[in-house]
Image (cartoon, grey):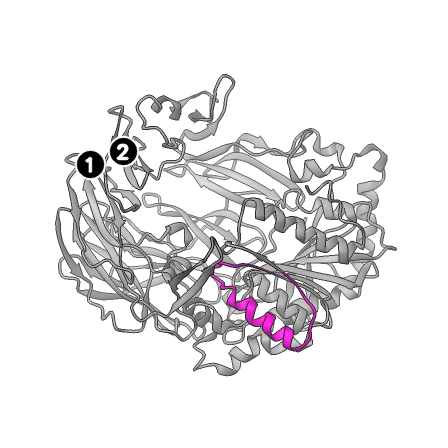
Amino acid sequence: MNLKLNSKFLLIFIPILFFVQFCYPQAKKELSFDQIFKNADPKVVVQLPNISGWIDDNSYLETKKKQGDDKPKVYQVDFKTGKDKVYRDYDEFKKIAPSGIMLNYPLATSSDGFKLLYSKENDLYLLDIKKNEFKKITETKSEEKNPTFSPDGNYIAFTRDNDLYSINLNTMKEYRYTNDGSKVIYNGYAAWLYYEEIFGRASRYKAFYWSPDSKKIAFYRFDETNVPLFPIFSSEGQHGYLEETRYPKAGDPNPEVKFGIVKVEQPDIVWADFNEKDDQYFGTPFWKPDSKSIFIQWMNRSQDNLKIYSIDISTGKKVEISDEKQSSWVEWYETLHFLKNDKGFLLISDKDGYSHIYWYSIDGKNSKQITSGKWSVVNIELVDDDKEVIYFTAKKEASTRTDLYKVDFNGKNITRLTFGNFTHSVKISPNGKYILDTYSNAITPPKMCIIDSKGKIVKEVADSKTPEFDNYLIAQSIMFKIKTSDGYDLPAVWTLPINFDENKKYPVIIEIYGGPGSPTVADSWKGLRNQWLAKEGVIVMSVDHRGSGHFGKEGMALMHRNLGKWEMNDYIEAVKWLHTKPFVDKNKICIIGGSYGGYVTLMALTYGADYFTHGIAQYSVTDWLLYDSHYTERYMDTPKENPDGYKKSSVLTYADKLKGKLQIVHGTMDDNVHMQNSIQLIDKLQDLGKHFELMLYPGQRHGWGGPKAKFLRNETYRFYYKYLLEKEFPEELFN
């Protein structure tokens, strides 16, 4: 359900909705605390099958525990017949495995699935399933990091003490490619800035890349000599200790970077033709299928110019392939797909204001836009070179939903393959014959089915909704839009209280993130997490601003050089809209978020103090001078270039306006958003005589799990009960 609601219609709509929903409340039961938070029986929703992906066009791999299994096994399932067979039983390897190895969690798996890598006491162990052999392949004091199989499975590459190595798994000969690894020099291992902002956390700091023919390795070398040290204090033990990390804040020197290529068994490095002293960034590289060259992304410090260079692997000579400039900033290319027979390559760019697919000739001299319109492509899922068809996901039907489409290479015949008003997540079989589709919306728990290449459902696989679901009162999440005074329709979703009564007054909790291009609102199932608050009589809401991504790069670019401005403008407009609703308690408008969401929360309680009354700010940026260079400067330019923008975007600038109930939360060893952010704000608030609450989490990084995660949840609800519900916190339930 996706409704654009004006104020008058909403007041009519809500009573009707809830009359329909609750006309026979006596026939419905209320969910218990344990059902909501502990997934206790009777379950109203269950997990969908754990399907990792297709093995061929007719079968997929599913991890499950069948009757008689001691532990889950990996099965190969023929989806047409339903027949399955054991694909991998980790218990079978116990007889040959050294004690202490967690067989279910290999570090790496070869492309054919028959070789697996494990680690024990910092050494690597190889399981060869075909040979039924388990052997130790390294024996050093230092840890081998990010071990990665070559495409043919005959080698592994890894880093050790910040140098790059490989091992021939047939001869067990070890090759060392670099010798200068140190505390500030990393070969094949990413500097923190690149791990966090460019390669992504999924990289686990890996910065080396096998060629398709398994004969070469490309890698980055990082020199952080000039990057400032940031001290992170641990209070552990009697004396504590300092953890010093190289962290470039806005305007600071960045790591110097070189790009090298080595032949696996001829460890002479060919360096790409770049000057490491230049102020620049490099992105994820892409090997050409023939392994004769590699495409590398280069970006200037200002991040408004992105180029692709082809690097000759024999000489390191670079040739410019493409050159993209924007007046705000340019996003990295996350995917680059080479077509067969050097017929060009595909990439996704937002240079026309929305993310779309572009074709380039292999030399970059010719290009064309394949998709267009005021909607965004999410990802290229599969390319059928023979039929000249591209399968891609996009937010075309609505910015809050994702669907699967196909389009011809010439941009014609765009066809939607998924169905209904749902958000879809897909896995496509190797040749595009079938698609495993997981879908849901705000009121429908996830379902799973298989569709063919024409979008026809050929098999229903699973439904997370149990027969018990309809026996319980479930507060529904409603999608709608809030129109700003200057004409933006902001996507929003809320969960209204069970037994909603428009004549009552309800507190509102607004959950946000708020970063550029990072939407919170999606037409998908949110689980049961809001049901307890709905039961207690709280409206839980999310809304996205104009720069969140729903309005393409056109909307995001408005945030350039002035973070905080449009977020606050639109969130304040949302609160003004809430104030027009007679059932909203204007004195209990609470906002909560972490990281960038923490920043927005703090801005809301200071800059927006006339509208927001309560807030919980978790591990928050408070001043963009204190955050890393690449992220901050993408939006703000350097402090030298934009001093006024930095001042206007700082929470510290508006600290004197605080008047609501604010709780500040931070992990003491946060290596992403340093606790320095909260400390500087606390210092300012104390000098101003402003009351606030503070909760520190010793030893915790940027977000955390374990017992402290449960404690954080409980403290968050304690805040809600004290200030929004004004009743005793039910300790016995949240134990």
**Was residue 731 drawn as part of the magenta stretch in this picture?**
no
- As drawn, is 20 to the left or to the right of 639? right
User: What amino acid type should be assigned to the residue bearing mark 1?
Assistant: Leu
Residue lying at 69% horizontally and 29% vertically, measured from the top left: 42
Residue lying at 60% horizontally and 69% vertically, measured from the top left: 567
Instruction: Identify the image quadrant of residue 32.
Output: top right
User: What amino acid type should be assigned to the residue bearing mark 2?
Assistant: Leu
Q: Kindly identify which residue carries mark 2.
A: 126
SS for tag 2? strand
Q: Are marks 2 and 1 in contact (CB under 8 Å)?
A: yes
As drawn, 596 above or below 38? below
Give the magenta part as a residue range. 665-694
Q: Kindly identify which residue carries mark 1.
A: 169
Tell which of 620 and 161 is nearer to you.
Answer: 161
Question: Where does the image place residue 452, in percent across and percent down from the top left?
Answer: 47, 36
**In this view, which residue lies farthest toward the front?**
238
Q: Residues within 10 Å of mark 2 (few under 14, many from 20)?
A: many
Question: Where does the image place residue 490, in percent across and percent down from the top left?
Answer: 64, 63
Q: CA distance from mark 2 to mark 1?
A: 9 Å
Question: Where does the image place residue 447, in percent across and percent down from the top left?
Answer: 58, 36
As drawn, 282 above or below 727? below
Instruction: Identify the image quadrant of residue 130.
Output: top left
